[in-house]
Amino acid sequence: MSTGTREGDEMLEHDQVVLRRGERSGIPVIVAIHSTRLGPAIGGCRLWRYPDWRDGLADALRLAEGMTIKNAAAGLPCGGGKTVLAVPPDLPLGRSARADLLADAGDLVESLGGRYIVGPDVGTSPDDMITIGERTGNVWCRPESYGGSGDSSPHTAAGVLAALDATLRHLYGPLNVAFPDAEQGGGVAGRRITVVGLGHVGSHLARSLAGAGAELTVTDVDPGRRMVAAELGARWADPVDALTAEADVLVPAALGGQLTTDLVPRLRCRAIVGPANNQLAAEQVAELLHRRGITWVPDYLASAGGVAYTVARELHGMLPPDAERQVTQIGARTATLLDAAARDAVSPHKAALQTIANLLAPTPA
């Protein structure tokens, strides 16, 4: 087992990094705890195939820091962490081997004494948390029938809708008269919105937008997702063209890194608000968007609905209706952020990072 801060400069920025070869599986299991300044670190368990375990380590470090930023931006009393199960490219992983690997992950999480709480991420599901939960109590998002908060995707989508609604109100003023009494989603009525990616979160979000009266365009690399467009009466676009389609709001809901320096001059939208993680291909893209007058709501805030719901249910013991109200607070946080950015004439990303830095700064002695 290797623990500590000697593997590179990035590790120096993390509270604790643990790498262990799974006792049962023989597969590298990595947990990175970036910060516990605001509370116990929380973050998902990513099961992925990597060319080298060091690639998994780099992913864990990056994702753990991202969770610290997301939780702080959403006002949650939690730090950030991540588990990565770095499966070699050609290693078979049947049902029994997968269960062994998840049990190894549970043992490592348990060894951390409650400093880190794990949930699902890419490659894992609420059902997998049952297996991990056999080895540790520091696990969230098990199915509701097992006492957990279940699938977070609908709540992630609800948080994006709240952020999107607040953004449109910021840009265009009062509610669209077609939905004068709507508390959430009314700002999207009649607005042209393009959703890029129709996975679990993107599909939930597209349905909510259609129900709120948006003029909807959707796309996905899987042509089978066209049925979602037909179901919602939305226009289907080619994935290559969708990012630069004329719209009020572009909603990235697929892979990260789609917002590049080359793309910015070709964009034809007023705002970008979506659940895809790590949307910026480079940090400078946020400033380029700001200079072009395109409002980018940072993905770490827009996508925080799922974790906000989970924290409300599993840390604070709230009932579902109360937890759902916590998710909608992302709208208020978005409005506050956009007002502060406009006041200081900076990008929302810069304004958010400054606020987060203040939250995470050490308390003076």
Image: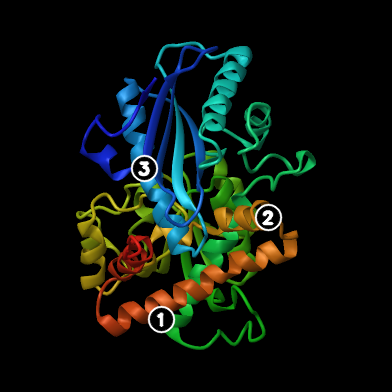
Q: Position of residue 264 (x, y in %)?
A: 24, 60
The quarter of the image holding the C terminus is bottom left
Which badge, 1 or 2, is on the more N-terminal residue? 1
The quarter of the image holding the N terminus is top left
Query: Image quadrant of residue 48?
Result: top left
Amino acid carrying mark 3 in the image:
Asp
Residue at 61%, 35% (x, y): give it: 125
Amino acid carrying mark 2 in the image:
Arg
Which residue bears the numbered disc 2? 313
Which badge, 3 or 2, is on the more N-terminal residue? 3
Q: CA distance from mark 3 to mark 2?
A: 26 Å
Q: CA distance from mark 1 to mark 3?
A: 40 Å
Which residue bears the numbered disc 1? 171
- Of residues 76 and 298, the one nearer the viewer is 76
Q: Which mark is residue 15?
A: 3
Query: Image quadrant of residue 262?
Result: bottom left
Q: Position of residue 84 (x, y in %)?
A: 44, 31
Residues marked 1 and 3 touching at CB (< 8 Å): no
- Colour scheme in the image? rainbow
Please name which of the two marks, 3 or 2, marks the residue nearer to the observer: 3
Is 190 placed above or below 199 here? Answer: below
